[in-house]
Amino acid sequence: KQEVTQIPAALSVPEGENLVLNCSFTDSAIYNLQWFRQDPGKGLTSLLLIQSSQREQTSGRLNASLDKSSGRSTLYIAASQPGDSATYLCAPTNFGNEKLTFGTGTRLTIIP
Amino acid sequence: KAGVTQTPRYLIKTRGQQVTLSCSPISGHRSVSWYQQTPGQGLQFLFEYFSETQRNKGNFPGRFSGRQFSNSRSEMNVSTLELGDSALYLCASSPTGTQNIQYFGAGTRLSVL
């Protein structure tokens, strides 16, 4: 059974700083991994999807890396802005099981 | 292109009642998945439908059921509501399943009194 851990649970940083969010998963037989953000009371917005054959994926100020063998993914946010404040969730998908398994998320606050 | 649409946005029900939630996927998407989000358990997978067939199911009691129509719209039903069913219910659509990016709706917030 896939288990996903995200550390830290909460993070506050001043505006403009670069930061890294961590995601660990126990079953490395994944098909892909997605990073999402969720604003309070809202649905999820997909940020990046990394296929198992990839090591990195970039979108604007966001860069996600994947190390399947060690069961880790990181989300790097450059030059953070107050609008980046949200909860960030990672979710791998395993082969033969068409579902996302979510971590508990990291609640990020960017201080102006 | 319109996004994933969930209706209603908010619902208040009492214990023992039943409820039906609706999800309209992005046009052309054939896979619809449902998730339950609670403060205690986080996001948990309910089920996934593809071309009107349930393809995968999570660990929820039989009171939770769903279906998908020929136009890919999906409904989920919860019978005999319990207080613990209070949650944000999210649906996600994708062209073929989790090989693709999953696009989520804004959710339906269900409160059971």
Image: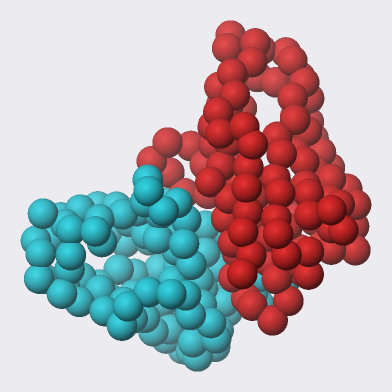
Chain colours: A red, B cyan
Q: Residue at x 55, y 86 (%)?
A: B55
Q: Quadrant of residue B27?
A: bottom right
Residue A2 at x, y percent in the picture: 64, 65
Q: Nearer the viewer, residue B46 or B84?
A: B84
Q: Is residue A10 above or below residue B33?
A: above
Q: Quadrant of residue B15?
A: bottom left
Q: How many numbered marks are there? A: 0
Residue A105 at x, y percent in the picture: 56, 42
In the image: residue A65, left or right of residue A80: right
In the image: residue A6, left or right of residue B8: right
Q: Nearer the viewer, residue B32 or A8?
A: A8
Which quadrant is the C terminus of chain A positioned in?
top right
**Residue A41 in sight:** yes
Residue A97 at x, y percent in the picture: 64, 77
In the image: residue B65, left or right of residue A103: left
Q: Residue at x 77, y 21 (%)?
A: A18
**Residue B102 in sight:** no
Which quadrant is the N terminus of chain A positioned in?
bottom right
Q: Nearer the viewer, residue B10 or B60?
A: B60
Residue B72 at x, y percent in the picture: 48, 80
Q: Residue at x 38, y 41 (%)?
A: A41
Q: Residue at x 50, y 71 (%)?
A: B33
